[in-house]
Structures are given as C-alpha cells and as structure tokens.
Image (tube, grey):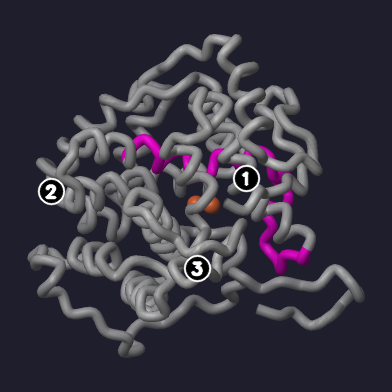
Amino acid sequence: MTVLTLQYPVHTLDGHELLPAGVALTGAVLAEMVVEGQKKTFADVSLLGYGTTRRDLAAYVREGNYRTILGDEADYAALLALMEKIRLPVPVLESLDHFKNNDTYTYRHVLMVFALSSTIARRMMRSFSDILQEASAGPLHDIGKICVPMEILKKATFLRRSERMYLEHHTMAGYVLLSYYLGNFGGIAPAVALDHHERGDGSGYPRGIALRGRLVEIVAACDVYDALISPRPYRQSSFDNRSALEEITRMAEQGKISWEIVRLLVALNRKDRPPPEECAVSLEKRGKSPDGNLYGVILDDEPEGSTPAR
Ligand SMILES: [Fe+2]
Ligand SMILES: [Fe+2]
C-alpha cells in the first residue's frame, strides 16, 4: 500500500495536534498515535440522542426528493431504529456541533449521507453488523474537514490549487482522527474517511487507487449524489434531481462509481419502487445543470489571474 504523507497537520477540535505536516502515515506512526488515544477515555454517546440530531434529521428528510428516497413512515422508522443503535465517542459527535455552528452545508451533508448510505445498505446487505458499520461510517466520512480552514470550506468562488489541496487533506485527516478516537486504524470508518473520494477508475484522491469494497463504494456514491442535489456555497442552485441522476449515471458509465448503487439510487427515486435490475437508466439529457456551478473549477496559484481549468 502506498504510504501517504500528510501535507498539513491533523488536530482535534480543541487544537491538540495529533500529527504534524510532513509525517508519513506508516503503521508504526498510526499505532503509536492509537496507543496515545487509548490512554484517554472517550465516552460513547448515542448519535440520535446527541444535541439536536434527531430533530434536524427529521426536518432534512422531509425536504425535496429525500421524502421520496427515504420512503414511507415504515422505512423512516427502520432508519431511526438503526440509528438508535449507533454510539460514537463524544469528540466525534462534537464535530457535528462544529459543522452545525460554522458550516451548515457540511452539517446537513453528513446527516444526509448517513441517511442515504444507511438506506442503500439496508437494501444491499444481509448482515446486520455490516449494515450497522455502514450506517456508523456515513456521518463520519467528512470529519477531517475540521482540519480544513472554514474560509476554504465555505468559499463561494473558484478554489486555488493550494486551497484544493488543503480541501483534499480532509480524507487523510479523517482517517487519522477516526483511527485515534475509535482506537483502531484498520476499521471501516477510518477506511471510508480515507477512500470516499477514490474512484473505480483510479481517478480520485488521495491515493488514486481503484475504489473497491462495498462499504466505501456506498458512501462514495451517496456522497456525490447528495453533493449534487444539496445547496452548496460554490453554485447558485442545486442540480435538479433528474440532472443529478444523469450525472451519477455518467460516472457509473465511466467506471468511477458502482452501477449497482447508482441503479438503487435511481430506483429509490421512483414512487413505485421498481426492482433496481428492472430500472432503466439513461444518459439522455433531460435535466439541466445549475448555472454558475463552480465545483471542480480550480485556479492556479501562479501566475495570478491564470485561466480557470477543470
Ligand atoms: Fe469528503
Ligand atoms: Fe462528503
């Protein structure tokens, strides 16, 4: 496995530096850090019972097409029953407060990726422990964003290349933070944090490896879909649902994300809930992408004023 090197430091919310910039994430470095974390005791608390999570989730799932995707009352009750079982260390849950207070886009996004990925997992997986692991990893996938400056996270114009690099740091930072708080750097939640921006064709980051593994693939696909249909600081409006489904279909066609999961997302968007294998997906251009969408538009740092490149 490629050994990654941190480009920026990883620190906790209260400013404790776990690892400095320039450190290679070797097994020995991570093991030493995990042992340090194990000397502290982080109380586990219910995700649903924490702060306003239950109320906020209930409000978000009634918005837009989430109401269709997350189904009827029985489906929602099953989702809540699953969520009731998730307990996470307090500092991990405090990251939700951090986003709620400072960056509501990210707050809403992590809760919605949790809801979407749990819904997909319940339909794709037989083992309850797999479903629970998937559900637990969903709300944590972007925790590394606590190590990215707010002005970059919330920037409403082009990102400069250096800012884009800092943003991409959230994958490694999330991996380090979750390894520390969960006391294990080989677990599924740290792996999801590290790999949820990898793609099936190797075009993602931070390692550029081929995205493999059902648990990570579910979060990766739900992450893209939610980012398209949700409000974002860098564009005037969200993708309409049809354009978003076409966008993820195109990504499946290019081998970037899983066909099976894309079909499920398409099926969940139909009120009649057809079996995913019978669900026709097409690339016909029926929807319309939003105007002024700056996602993926990078501006070079040098020279000043160079042309934006995708
Ligand atoms: Fe992310
Ligand atoms: Fe995300």
**Type of the residue with mark 1:** Met
Disc 1 secondary structure class: helix
Identify the residue under disc 3: 237
Q: Position of residue 168 (x, y in %)?
A: 65, 55
Q: Position of residue 199 (x, y in %)?
A: 48, 65
Residue bounds of the magenta highlight? 135-161
CB-based contact (under 8 Å), mark 2 and mark 3: no
**Type of the residue with mark 2:** Asp
State which tag comes first along the sequence, 1 or 2: 2
Whole-number angstrom distance, CA of label 3 to CA of label 1: 29 Å
Q: Position of residue 163 (x, y in %)?
A: 75, 58
State which tag comes first along the sequence, 3 or 1: 1
Whole-number angstrom distance, CA of label 2 to CA of label 3: 27 Å
Between disc 3 and disc 1, the foreground one is 1
Identify the residue under disc 2: 72
Examine the image and state in which quarter residue 236 appears: bottom right
Identify the residue under disc 1: 172
Residue 53 versus residue 123 in the image, above or below: above
